[in-house]
Image (cartoon, helix red, strand yellow):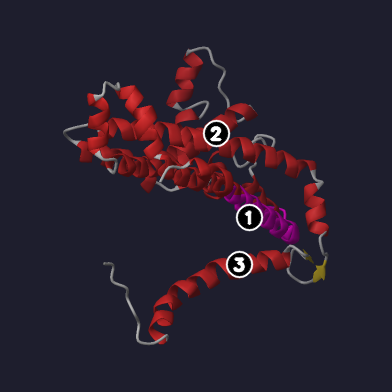
Amino acid sequence: MQRRVIFPGMLLPYLLLAPQIAVTLVFFFWPAGQAVWYSTRREDPFGLSSVFAGLDNFTDILTDPGYLHSLAITAVFSVAVTVLALVPSLLLAVMADRVAKGRAVYSTILLLPYAIAPAIAGVLWLFMFQPSLGIVAYWLHCAGINWNYVLDGDQAMLLVILAAAWKQISYDFLFFLAGLQSIPKSVLEAAAIDGASRNRRFWTIVLPLLSPTTFFLLTVNIVYAFFETFGVIHSVTGGGPAKATEILVFKVWYDGVVGLDLGGSAAQSVILMAIVVALTAIQFRYVERKVHY
């Protein structure tokens, strides 16, 4: 019989919840409310005046070809980062789970990239692919590939996708490995006795049992690609060349900090938040149906 915790009064539960509620209000609801407020204003770049603009900021943004271009780039970038982070991390988790000796050593080494900040991860890949100094760029030139991401927008996009996905692989690997280790060995042994090959056991037993973990990581990776990859973009390409890698979160920063369009930047942040919330709701509405708990 499960025992329930009963508090003698209402004061103690509220006191225990107060720190978390305060953090949520100060660091989430208050900034979100300010963003919504400023998105309806025309702000002076020097903060000397503010005029109510209604939905004019949103109208200007949604009719701006540059913003629509950034939206398309963000869609490609987020899908590519999510796929390139999930697939290798699952493969590495499966391989590490099969290791009998030294599993902790392999797992620790594979988790190290997660301790690196996104900006530092971008700089590491920048050094390797720098057209005149990078070792990988030198190999590409020796192979006859004209590599210069500074001038080629497609190459720049490929570089930031690889850097962002590499940074996230360790996080996904940790959860996939935990999910694999939670699968009962008796189920796999019974399937092996019935004659199921290793590949068949993976596709028919392991992968369906990992669907809750995969669903969680799918949601987390999309949010990561939309918000937490700013450091990679800023340190590697700065949104260039010719805005070829200017994703939405970078455009919010650039228009607000560099362009000093505070109202437009706030409106972009509200739209970005709405997009991520909508994508998360769609995943829970449709993708979760295929998850086996």
Q: Please state if 8 lies on the left or on the right of 280 as rendered.
A: left
Give the CA distance from mark 1 to mark 2. 20 Å
Magenta-span inclusion, residue 268: yes
Chief secondary structure of the magenta portion: helix
Examine the image and state in which quarter residue 256 appears: bottom right
Label 1 crowd (10 A; few <14 / some 14-19 / many >=20): some
Examine the image and state in which quarter residue 87 appears: top left
- Taking the view exactly as shown, the residue that stands out farthest to the left is 101
276 relative to 38, above or below: above
Q: For residue 126, which numbered disc appears in the image?
A: none
Residue identifier under label 1: 273
> What residue type is disc 1 on?
Met
Give the CA distance from mark 1 to mark 3. 12 Å
Q: Please state if 101 lies on the left or on the right of 8 as rendered.
A: left
Please report the bounds of the magenta region as a residue range: 256-281
> Measuring 50% from the left and 17% from the top, which residue is drawn there?
141
Secondary structure under the numbered disc 1 in the rendered image: helix
Does the image show residue 135?
Answer: yes
Label 3 crowd (10 A; few <14 / some 14-19 / many >=20): few
> What residue type is disc 2 on?
Ala
Q: Earlier in the sequence, mark 1 or mark 3?
A: 3
Quadrant showing the N terminus: bottom left
Magenta-span inclusion, residue 253: no
The one nearer the camera, 19 or 227, is: 19
Secondary structure under the numbered disc 2 in the rendered image: helix
Does the image show residue 126?
Answer: no
The one nearer the camera, 42 or 1, is: 1
Give percent across and percent down for residue 83: 50, 34
Q: Earlier in the sequence, mark 1 or mark 2?
A: 2
Residue identifier under label 2: 80
